[in-house]
Image (cartoon, grey):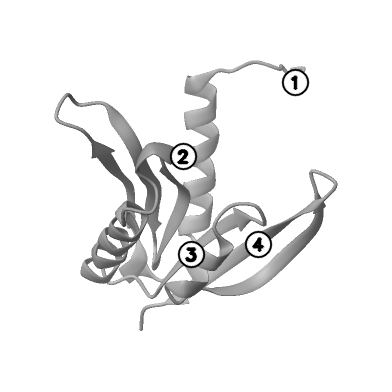
């Protein structure tokens, strides 16, 4: 049997890789954390259903990971970012998560997250040649 590498956007193959990695990882966590994976989607919509922002993340074992948080420029500074973040934090507490982790770039929302109690635990320099990539965590317990 021979093997080869393809370069393609294959959703079925991606799901297979994700599922297999999850099963492998599950073997290394305590039994009480098994089957703790849940995708989180929170969205800011207007009366017509148009999306103006949102938060995408997942609960995995004992943490919530926030992948994306975006608020449209037309409604920034109106508190919706805080509302999204607090809603996600409440979900994490309800689901008995121990911490939340996320990342942001130096031109994005570092101060916003720090204002909400997130602490930098790692940094990458030379991102886009002139920026920094920050990794943040907030303990919930």
Instruction: Residue at 31% x, 47% y: name it.
Output: 40
Q: Which of marks 2 and 1 is nearer the N terminus?
A: 1
Indicate the position of residue 52 as horizontal and vertical percent values. Answer: 33, 35
Helix, strand or loop under label 3: helix
Mark 4–mark 3 distance (CA, rounded to whole Å) = 13 Å
Which residue is nearer to you in this view: 140 or 46? 46
Residue 116 visible, this orientation: yes
Mark 3–mark 2 distance (CA, rounded to whole Å) = 33 Å
Q: Earlier in the sequence, mark 3 or mark 2?
A: 2
Q: Earlier in the sequence, mark 2 or mark 4?
A: 2
Residue assigned mark 1: 5
Q: Which of marks 4 and 1 is nearer the N terminus?
A: 1
State the residue lying farthest toward the left: 47
Q: Residues within 10 Å of mark 1 (few under 14, many from 20)?
A: few
Residue assigned mark 3: 112
Residue assigned mark 2: 19
Mark 1–mark 3 distance (CA, rounded to whole Å) = 41 Å
Indicate the position of residue 118 as horizontal and vertical percent values. Answer: 49, 73
């Amino acid at each position: 049997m021979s093997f080869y590498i393809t370069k393609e956007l294959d959703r079925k193959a991606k799901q297979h890789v994700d599922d297999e990695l999850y099963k492998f990882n599950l073997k290394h966590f305590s039994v009480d954390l098994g089957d703790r994976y849940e995708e989180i989607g929170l969205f800011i919509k207007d009366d017509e259903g148009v999306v103006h922002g949102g938060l995408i993340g997942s609960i995995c074992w004992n943490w919530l990971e926030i992948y994306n948080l975006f608020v449209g420029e037309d409604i920034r500074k109106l508190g919706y970012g805080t509302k999204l973040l607090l809603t996600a934090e409440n979900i994490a507490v309800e689901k008995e998560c121990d911490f939340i982790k996320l990342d942001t770039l130096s031109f994005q929302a570092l101060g916003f997250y720090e204002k909400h109690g997130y602490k930098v635990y790692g940094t990458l320099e030379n991102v886009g040649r002139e920026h920094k990539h920050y990794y943040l965590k907030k303990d919930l317990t």
